[in-house]
Amino acid sequence: MKFLIGIILAFGFFQLQAAKITAVKVGSKINVTIDGKYFTSYICSSDEKYPFFYPVNGPLSGGSVTSMRNGEYPHHSSLFFGCDQVNGGNYWQEGLERGRIISVNAEILKEGGDTVLITDECIWSRPGALSPIKDSRKFTITSPSATVKQIDVEITMEMLLDVTIKKTNHSLFSARMAADLSVKNGGALVNAEGESGEKATFGKSSAWMDFSGKRGDYIEGLAILQHPSNPWYPSPWFTRDYGFISPTPMYWPADDKETILKKGEKLLLRYRVLVHGGNSVDAKVAEIFEQYKK
Protein backbone atom coordinates (compact mmCIF):
# COMPACT_ATOMS: atom_id res chain seq x y z
CA MET A 1 0.00 0.00 0.00
CA LYS A 2 2.70 2.52 0.97
CA PHE A 3 4.66 1.69 -2.19
CA LEU A 4 1.59 2.41 -4.32
CA ILE A 5 1.00 5.70 -2.50
CA GLY A 6 4.60 6.68 -3.21
CA ILE A 7 4.10 5.96 -6.91
CA ILE A 8 0.93 8.06 -6.96
CA LEU A 9 2.67 10.99 -5.27
CA ALA A 10 5.77 10.73 -7.45
CA PHE A 11 3.83 10.76 -10.70
CA GLY A 12 0.71 12.61 -9.60
CA PHE A 13 1.42 15.59 -11.83
CA PHE A 14 1.42 13.47 -14.97
CA GLN A 15 -2.23 12.76 -15.50
CA LEU A 16 -2.94 10.97 -18.78
CA GLN A 17 -6.54 12.07 -18.98
CA ALA A 18 -8.06 15.26 -17.62
CA ALA A 19 -10.39 14.76 -14.70
CA LYS A 20 -14.10 15.21 -15.33
CA ILE A 21 -15.47 17.77 -12.90
CA THR A 22 -19.19 18.27 -12.40
CA ALA A 23 -21.36 20.53 -10.27
CA VAL A 24 -25.03 20.62 -9.35
CA LYS A 25 -26.99 23.11 -7.29
CA VAL A 26 -29.18 21.49 -4.65
CA GLY A 27 -31.08 24.01 -2.55
CA SER A 28 -28.52 26.34 -0.98
CA LYS A 29 -25.52 24.18 -1.90
CA ILE A 30 -23.45 23.70 -5.02
CA ASN A 31 -21.98 20.20 -4.88
CA VAL A 32 -18.81 19.45 -6.84
CA THR A 33 -17.52 16.03 -7.87
CA ILE A 34 -14.21 15.09 -9.49
CA ASP A 35 -14.18 11.88 -11.51
CA GLY A 36 -17.38 10.82 -9.78
CA LYS A 37 -16.04 11.42 -6.26
CA TYR A 38 -17.55 14.10 -4.03
CA PHE A 39 -15.00 16.91 -3.54
CA THR A 40 -16.70 19.91 -1.94
CA SER A 41 -19.83 22.01 -1.52
CA TYR A 42 -20.16 25.77 -1.77
CA ILE A 43 -22.73 26.50 0.93
CA CYS A 44 -24.70 29.75 0.62
CA SER A 45 -27.64 29.19 2.96
CA SER A 46 -29.73 32.15 4.12
CA ASP A 47 -29.21 31.16 7.77
CA GLU A 48 -25.42 31.12 7.61
CA LYS A 49 -23.03 33.89 8.62
CA TYR A 50 -21.33 33.86 5.22
CA PRO A 51 -20.90 31.50 2.25
CA PHE A 52 -18.16 28.86 2.63
CA PHE A 53 -16.81 25.57 1.29
CA TYR A 54 -17.36 22.39 3.30
CA PRO A 55 -16.28 19.64 3.24
CA VAL A 56 -13.04 19.98 1.29
CA ASN A 57 -12.15 16.35 0.71
CA GLY A 58 -8.58 15.15 0.33
CA PRO A 59 -7.50 13.33 -2.85
CA LEU A 60 -6.24 10.20 -1.05
CA SER A 61 -8.38 9.63 2.04
CA GLY A 62 -11.61 11.13 0.72
CA GLY A 63 -12.09 12.81 4.12
CA SER A 64 -12.25 16.56 4.64
CA VAL A 65 -8.96 18.36 5.25
CA THR A 66 -10.97 21.20 6.80
CA SER A 67 -13.31 21.24 9.78
CA MET A 68 -16.47 23.01 10.81
CA ARG A 69 -17.35 24.89 13.96
CA ASN A 70 -16.34 23.44 17.30
CA GLY A 71 -17.27 24.46 20.83
CA GLU A 72 -14.24 26.69 21.29
CA TYR A 73 -14.26 28.35 17.86
CA PRO A 74 -17.82 28.22 16.47
CA HIS A 75 -17.01 31.02 14.02
CA HIS A 76 -14.53 28.92 12.01
CA SER A 77 -16.36 27.43 9.03
CA SER A 78 -13.90 25.42 6.95
CA LEU A 79 -12.77 27.54 3.97
CA PHE A 80 -14.32 31.01 4.16
CA PHE A 81 -14.07 34.77 3.65
CA GLY A 82 -15.23 37.45 6.09
CA CYS A 83 -14.12 40.35 8.27
CA ASP A 84 -14.72 41.79 11.74
CA GLN A 85 -14.71 45.45 12.86
CA VAL A 86 -16.22 46.81 9.61
CA ASN A 87 -17.99 50.13 10.34
CA GLY A 88 -19.03 48.73 13.70
CA GLY A 89 -20.25 45.41 12.26
CA ASN A 90 -18.91 41.88 12.63
CA TYR A 91 -18.96 39.84 9.41
CA TRP A 92 -16.92 36.99 10.86
CA GLN A 93 -18.01 35.74 14.27
CA GLU A 94 -21.27 34.08 15.25
CA GLY A 95 -24.44 36.16 15.64
CA LEU A 96 -26.35 37.09 12.48
CA GLU A 97 -27.55 40.33 14.06
CA ARG A 98 -23.93 41.55 14.27
CA GLY A 99 -23.54 41.35 10.49
CA ARG A 100 -23.88 38.85 7.65
CA ILE A 101 -22.48 38.30 4.18
CA ILE A 102 -25.50 37.24 2.13
CA SER A 103 -25.20 35.29 -1.11
CA VAL A 104 -27.67 36.72 -3.63
CA ASN A 105 -26.69 35.07 -6.90
CA ALA A 106 -24.69 31.84 -6.65
CA GLU A 107 -24.47 30.21 -10.10
CA ILE A 108 -22.66 27.44 -11.95
CA LEU A 109 -21.25 28.98 -15.13
CA LYS A 110 -19.32 25.92 -16.30
CA GLU A 111 -19.22 22.23 -15.41
CA GLY A 112 -18.87 18.80 -16.94
CA GLY A 113 -15.42 19.18 -18.52
CA ASP A 114 -12.09 19.62 -16.75
CA THR A 115 -13.26 22.77 -14.92
CA VAL A 116 -16.09 23.93 -12.71
CA LEU A 117 -16.70 27.67 -12.53
CA ILE A 118 -18.90 29.06 -9.75
CA THR A 119 -19.78 32.74 -9.39
CA ASP A 120 -21.59 34.59 -6.64
CA GLU A 121 -22.60 38.09 -5.64
CA CYS A 122 -22.77 38.95 -1.97
CA ILE A 123 -24.01 41.87 0.10
CA TRP A 124 -22.65 42.67 3.55
CA SER A 125 -25.72 43.42 5.67
CA ARG A 126 -26.48 44.40 9.27
CA PRO A 127 -29.83 45.39 10.84
CA GLY A 128 -30.17 49.14 11.29
CA ALA A 129 -27.08 50.01 9.22
CA LEU A 130 -26.33 50.72 5.57
CA SER A 131 -24.48 47.95 3.77
CA PRO A 132 -20.78 48.90 3.71
CA ILE A 133 -19.54 46.42 1.08
CA LYS A 134 -20.69 44.21 -1.74
CA ASP A 135 -18.50 41.59 -3.29
CA SER A 136 -18.40 39.43 -6.40
CA ARG A 137 -16.76 36.01 -6.33
CA LYS A 138 -15.39 33.59 -8.89
CA PHE A 139 -14.24 30.09 -7.98
CA THR A 140 -12.48 27.99 -10.60
CA ILE A 141 -12.10 24.34 -9.59
CA THR A 142 -9.68 22.08 -11.43
CA SER A 143 -7.67 18.90 -10.81
CA PRO A 144 -4.11 19.32 -12.09
CA SER A 145 -3.25 15.76 -11.07
CA ALA A 146 -4.58 12.72 -9.26
CA THR A 147 -3.12 14.05 -6.01
CA VAL A 148 -3.86 17.78 -6.30
CA LYS A 149 -7.25 19.48 -6.38
CA GLN A 150 -7.27 23.23 -6.94
CA ILE A 151 -9.64 26.10 -6.17
CA ASP A 152 -8.71 29.46 -7.70
CA VAL A 153 -10.44 32.24 -5.81
CA GLU A 154 -11.13 35.77 -7.06
CA ILE A 155 -13.07 38.14 -4.81
CA THR A 156 -13.71 41.77 -5.73
CA MET A 157 -14.79 43.92 -2.80
CA GLU A 158 -16.56 47.20 -3.63
CA MET A 159 -16.97 49.82 -0.93
CA LEU A 160 -20.55 51.14 -0.87
CA LEU A 161 -19.62 53.65 1.84
CA ASP A 162 -16.47 55.02 3.36
CA VAL A 163 -15.27 51.97 5.29
CA THR A 164 -13.15 51.81 8.43
CA ILE A 165 -11.87 48.42 9.53
CA LYS A 166 -10.39 48.58 12.99
CA LYS A 167 -7.38 46.42 13.79
CA THR A 168 -8.62 42.83 13.87
CA ASN A 169 -7.21 39.33 13.62
CA HIS A 170 -10.45 38.24 11.92
CA SER A 171 -10.11 39.28 8.31
CA LEU A 172 -10.46 37.99 4.76
CA PHE A 173 -9.63 34.52 3.40
CA SER A 174 -9.11 31.70 5.90
CA ALA A 175 -8.99 27.96 6.44
CA ARG A 176 -9.78 25.94 9.55
CA MET A 177 -8.05 22.60 9.27
CA ALA A 178 -9.23 19.17 10.32
CA ALA A 179 -7.99 18.35 13.82
CA ASP A 180 -5.80 15.43 12.71
CA LEU A 181 -3.75 17.76 10.48
CA SER A 182 -3.02 20.31 13.21
CA VAL A 183 0.46 20.77 14.64
CA LYS A 184 -0.98 19.86 18.03
CA ASN A 185 -1.81 16.42 16.64
CA GLY A 186 1.45 15.86 14.79
CA GLY A 187 0.81 17.81 11.59
CA ALA A 188 3.11 20.33 9.92
CA LEU A 189 2.56 24.07 9.34
CA VAL A 190 5.08 25.48 6.85
CA ASN A 191 5.45 28.77 4.96
CA ALA A 192 7.23 29.64 1.70
CA GLU A 193 10.47 30.37 3.56
CA GLY A 194 10.49 26.94 5.19
CA GLU A 195 9.64 28.27 8.64
CA SER A 196 7.40 25.92 10.58
CA GLY A 197 4.91 26.09 13.42
CA GLU A 198 2.89 28.94 14.86
CA LYS A 199 5.78 30.55 16.71
CA ALA A 200 7.90 30.90 13.56
CA THR A 201 5.12 31.80 11.09
CA PHE A 202 2.77 34.05 13.08
CA GLY A 203 2.89 37.62 11.78
CA LYS A 204 5.39 36.75 9.07
CA SER A 205 4.81 37.92 5.51
CA SER A 206 4.95 34.99 3.14
CA ALA A 207 3.64 34.08 -0.32
CA TRP A 208 1.99 30.85 0.86
CA MET A 209 1.24 28.64 3.84
CA ASP A 210 0.68 24.89 3.99
CA PHE A 211 -0.79 22.49 6.56
CA SER A 212 -0.30 18.75 6.17
CA GLY A 213 -0.47 15.68 8.36
CA LYS A 214 -0.74 11.90 8.51
CA ARG A 215 -4.13 10.23 8.23
CA GLY A 216 -3.82 6.48 8.45
CA ASP A 217 -1.58 5.34 5.58
CA TYR A 218 -1.80 8.73 3.87
CA ILE A 219 -0.41 12.23 4.20
CA GLU A 220 -2.70 15.05 3.03
CA GLY A 221 -2.85 18.78 3.34
CA LEU A 222 -4.05 22.16 2.16
CA ALA A 223 -2.14 25.24 1.06
CA ILE A 224 -3.28 28.83 0.52
CA LEU A 225 -1.28 30.86 -2.00
CA GLN A 226 -1.55 34.66 -2.23
CA HIS A 227 -1.35 36.19 -5.68
CA PRO A 228 1.32 38.92 -5.98
CA SER A 229 -1.25 41.34 -7.44
CA ASN A 230 -3.18 41.41 -4.15
CA PRO A 231 -3.27 44.58 -2.08
CA TRP A 232 -0.88 44.25 0.90
CA TYR A 233 0.99 41.36 -0.74
CA PRO A 234 2.55 39.44 0.82
CA SER A 235 0.21 39.80 3.77
CA PRO A 236 1.42 38.60 7.15
CA TRP A 237 -0.24 35.44 8.37
CA PHE A 238 -2.35 34.71 11.40
CA THR A 239 -1.47 31.10 12.22
CA ARG A 240 -2.44 28.72 14.97
CA ASP A 241 -0.97 25.31 15.76
CA TYR A 242 -4.49 24.06 16.48
CA GLY A 243 -5.19 24.32 12.74
CA PHE A 244 -5.91 27.82 11.43
CA ILE A 245 -4.31 29.91 8.68
CA SER A 246 -5.23 33.29 7.22
CA PRO A 247 -3.27 35.99 5.37
CA THR A 248 -4.57 38.82 7.52
CA PRO A 249 -3.50 42.38 6.63
CA MET A 250 -6.05 43.98 8.94
CA TYR A 251 -4.19 42.70 12.02
CA TRP A 252 -1.08 44.64 10.99
CA PRO A 253 -2.39 47.94 9.52
CA ALA A 254 0.13 50.61 8.56
CA ASP A 255 -0.73 52.86 11.49
CA ASP A 256 -1.34 49.90 13.85
CA LYS A 257 -4.92 51.13 14.35
CA GLU A 258 -7.20 50.77 11.33
CA THR A 259 -7.61 50.30 7.60
CA ILE A 260 -9.55 53.01 5.73
CA LEU A 261 -11.18 52.38 2.34
CA LYS A 262 -13.07 55.03 0.41
CA LYS A 263 -16.57 54.76 -1.09
CA GLY A 264 -16.33 53.36 -4.63
CA GLU A 265 -12.93 51.79 -4.04
CA LYS A 266 -12.56 48.24 -5.35
CA LEU A 267 -10.15 45.57 -4.15
CA LEU A 268 -9.43 42.42 -6.16
CA LEU A 269 -8.16 39.60 -3.96
CA ARG A 270 -6.87 36.39 -5.54
CA TYR A 271 -5.90 33.16 -3.82
CA ARG A 272 -5.13 29.61 -4.92
CA VAL A 273 -6.11 26.72 -2.67
CA LEU A 274 -4.31 23.41 -3.16
CA VAL A 275 -5.83 20.31 -1.61
CA HIS A 276 -3.08 17.75 -1.93
CA GLY A 277 -1.62 14.39 -1.13
CA GLY A 278 1.74 14.34 0.64
CA ASN A 279 3.41 17.29 2.35
CA SER A 280 4.21 20.66 0.77
CA VAL A 281 7.35 19.30 -0.91
CA ASP A 282 5.58 16.22 -2.30
CA ALA A 283 2.80 18.45 -3.63
CA LYS A 284 5.30 20.87 -5.21
CA VAL A 285 3.60 23.87 -3.61
CA ALA A 286 6.62 26.13 -4.23
CA GLU A 287 6.71 25.18 -7.92
CA ILE A 288 2.97 25.71 -8.31
CA PHE A 289 3.31 29.16 -6.75
CA GLU A 290 5.99 30.07 -9.30
CA GLN A 291 3.51 29.21 -12.06
CA TYR A 292 0.63 30.99 -10.30
CA LYS A 293 2.43 34.29 -9.83
CA LYS A 294 3.16 34.78 -13.53
Image (cartoon, grey):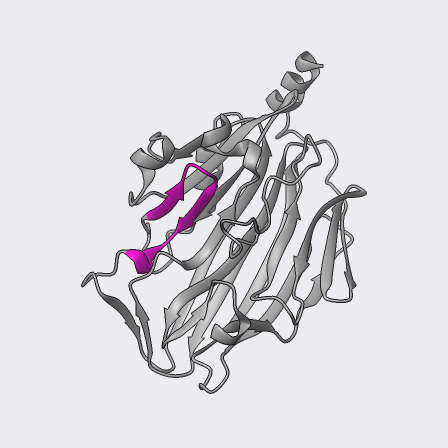
> Residue 167 magenta-drawn?
no
**Magenta span of residues:** 237-251
Q: Is residue 238 above or below residue 133?
A: above
- Residue that appears at 42% across and 51% down: 227
Q: How many numbered marks have been drawn onto this rendered protein structure?
A: 0
Quarter location, residue 286: top left
Q: Is residue 245 left or right of residue 231?
A: right
Give the x, y percent position of residue 229: 38, 56
- Residue that appears at 42% across and 80% down: 132
> Residue 244 magenta-drawn?
yes
Q: Nearer the viewer, residue 133 or 47?
A: 47
Outermost left residue: 255
Give the x, y percent position of residue 276: 59, 34
Quarter location, residue 7: top right
Outermost right residue: 36
- Residue that appears at 36% across and 69% down: 85
Can the viewer see residue 294 in this picture? no
Q: Is residue 287 above or below residue 244?
A: above
Q: Is residue 210 above or below residue 83?
A: above
